[in-house]
Image (cartoon, grey):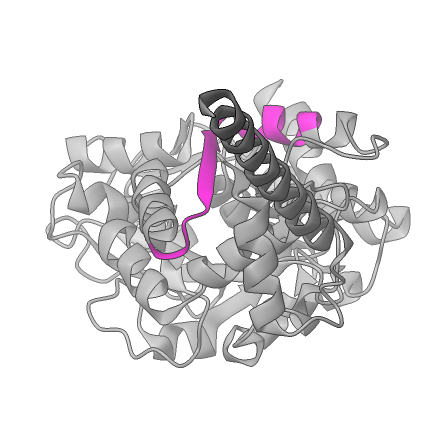
Amino acid sequence: MKNNLKSRLTFLFMLLCLTVFLSGMIFAAAAQEIDLQTASWDEIVAAAKAEGQVTFYAWYFADYFKDAAEAFESQYGVKVNLIIGDQTANFNKAISEKDRAVGTIDVMIVGGQWVKTTMDLDLFYGPMKNVIPDADKLAPTIWEVQEGVLTKGYLTPFHRNQTGILYDPERVSNPPQTWAELEAWIDANPKKFGFNDPSKGGSGQSFVHTLIKETTGGLDKYKGDTDVVPEKVANWNLAWEWVNARKDKLTFTVSNNDSITRLNDGEIAMTFAWDDNVKDMMNKGNIFTRAKMYIPRMGAAGGGDTLGVLKNSPNKAAAALFIYHIISKEQQLKKFEMVGAYPARTDIPIEGTLLTEEDRANNAIAWFPAPYKSFMISEFVKNVLMK
């Protein structure tokens, strides 16, 4: 009698285990087979929960993303494998895995300098603009173009960033608006204007970008180019000559943060900087709160970063859900509060920004296409830093 009961209990336990196993297999299969382009959002959320995890690669905003990951896990029960690593290492890993049927990265930040390379390699799944709810609430220009490269809705905007002139108002009473005014200020205040090596950070790239605009005939001629056109850069020597003629009046820094630190320490009084970088350093007490920032009338470059789902992601539904979490109103505001990163959403009123909306609308300029930026960096190193 006891043996019979034991046998029945054993059979029932095995049946239960088999049921759980088969259910897991069914859920996994459903998650793998779901077509994000045709599925409803509720189906995508269910598939994401069945996948159970998402692996996200970033290289900045570590504190914010840790907080966002915890909130995501709490809300959806989907584990976030958060990897904060070197930018180049992140992309080299994604590129090295591109021919695998299944990779190890689900979603990653896509910075401007990597857009052309990754799009040329067909690295990302998409378009995501058809998948993510509230896609129409995100900056429309960044949905279509990033760093002068057509992204066709594959890369989801998650924040906007902008460069401008950062200065100490106690040492700069009338900050320059035009290139001629900047030249005059530099001549009158030697070594007090600094910018970082453009191979080490985007704020230095922005200054050199404006330098090229002002000394070689504007930026319109580069629009739409997918590669560097030699005839269009033939007079860039004028930009390098401008810098070389003023080497004893300029201060070269080694990074975005180094420029801000030198301003804080009083070595320089004015520099090019990123608005979100400055706000983050202010929040951490790494620069005095009296510092001011603006976009001059001559223009400074801006754009934004995006999130891309890898084509061979093992958890595409969870990746889509994680992106939706990051672009939600709650998270966009949290990111701004924590690190000062300007929201990608256009339906959120923001106060307390370093740059005004008027500045952004009137004076922000788009980067020229990425091949020109890469060429600009290499030519600056060769013609300025190595001389």
Residue farthest along the front direction in this orientation: 1
Residue at point 17%, 36% (across, down) = 286
Residue 290 on image: x %, y %: 11, 53
Boundaries of the magenta span: 75-93
Residue in the foreground of this view, choosing between 320 and 348: 320
Q: Please indicate, yes or no, whether residue 199 appears anywhere in the rendered image.
A: yes
Left or right for 203, reference 21: left
* Quadrant containing the C terminus in the rendered view: top right
- Verify whether residue 352 appears in magenta: no
Left or right for 370, reference 306: right
Question: From what the image shows, is residue 383 above or below residue 72?
Answer: above
Question: From what the image shows, is residue 228 above or below residue 325?
Answer: above
Residue at point 56%, 61% (across, down) = 46
Residue 22 on image: x %, y %: 67, 43
Residue 376 on image: x %, y %: 68, 40
Residue in the foreground of this view, choosing between 167 and 236: 167
Residue 191 on image: x %, y %: 32, 33
